[in-house]
Image: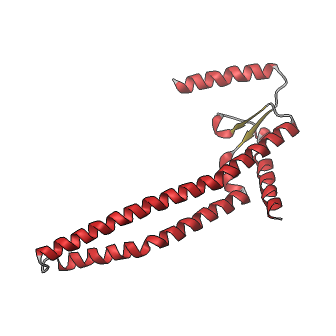
Amino acid sequence: MRRIIFILFISILCSILYSQNVKIGVIDTVKLFQQSKKISELQKQLQNLLIQKKSEIEPLQNKIQKLEQEINEKKSIMKKELLKKKQEELDDLYSKLRTKQEKIKDEISKKQDEMLKPLYQTLKDIITRIGQREGFTIIVEKDALLYNAPQIDITDEVIKELDKSSSNAKK
């Protein structure tokens, strides 16, 4: 039902726009994220942060693995009290690991938001500039369309300006 309403809305919008002198542009966000050097740099920074954070929990994971191995190998000869103590120690280590993983997940999410917020603002500014400069009435995301002619795709221009803005910012 929503899809029908959406298609109906787009059809009405297109007929209204067709009756006026309208210029429509399209941006392929998948292509933008795959081909922009600036976005690739941000993705590398996030990946490096993820690797760094994973290395912080590695010692705890190794400790858990060793304790599990010890328990499994010796549980048949271990006294019940000692086995219970080792099991509690293991449970405690798992709890610490989950806590650390959640903390890392939150840190990475926060860092990702920190990095993407200015990127989205920059993209919005670039798209607005291109729209005004080239006289576009409307610029939409390609995923919102069933079909678009290739000549109205401005993704390459957006990528070019985004990467140019990042190289200017470094100078």
| Relative vertical location of residue 106 with respect to residue 120 in this rendering, above or below | below
Q: Residue at x 74, y 20 (%)?
A: 15
> x, y percentage for residue 136?
82, 34
> x, y percentage for residue 16?
75, 19
In the drawing, does residue 139 fall left or right of residue 146? Answer: right
**Which corner quadrant of the image does residue 133 belong to?**
top right
In the drawing, does residue 58 fall left or right of residue 84? Answer: right
Q: How many marks?
A: 0
**Which corner quadrant of the image does residue 8 belong to?**
top right
In the drawing, does residue 96 fall left or right of residue 107? Answer: left
Q: Residue at x 18, y 80 (%)?
A: 74
Q: Quadrant of the C terminus?
A: bottom right
> x, y percentage for residue 124?
74, 43
Q: 170 or 158, which lies in front?
A: 170
Q: Residue at x 63, y 64 (%)?
A: 44
Q: 4 or 41, which lies in front?
A: 41
**Which corner quadrant of the image does residue 60 belong to?**
bottom left
| Relative vertical location of residue 110 with respect to residue 58 in this rendering, above or below | above
Q: Is residue 154 visible?
A: no
In the drawing, does residue 57 fall left or right of residue 117? Answer: left
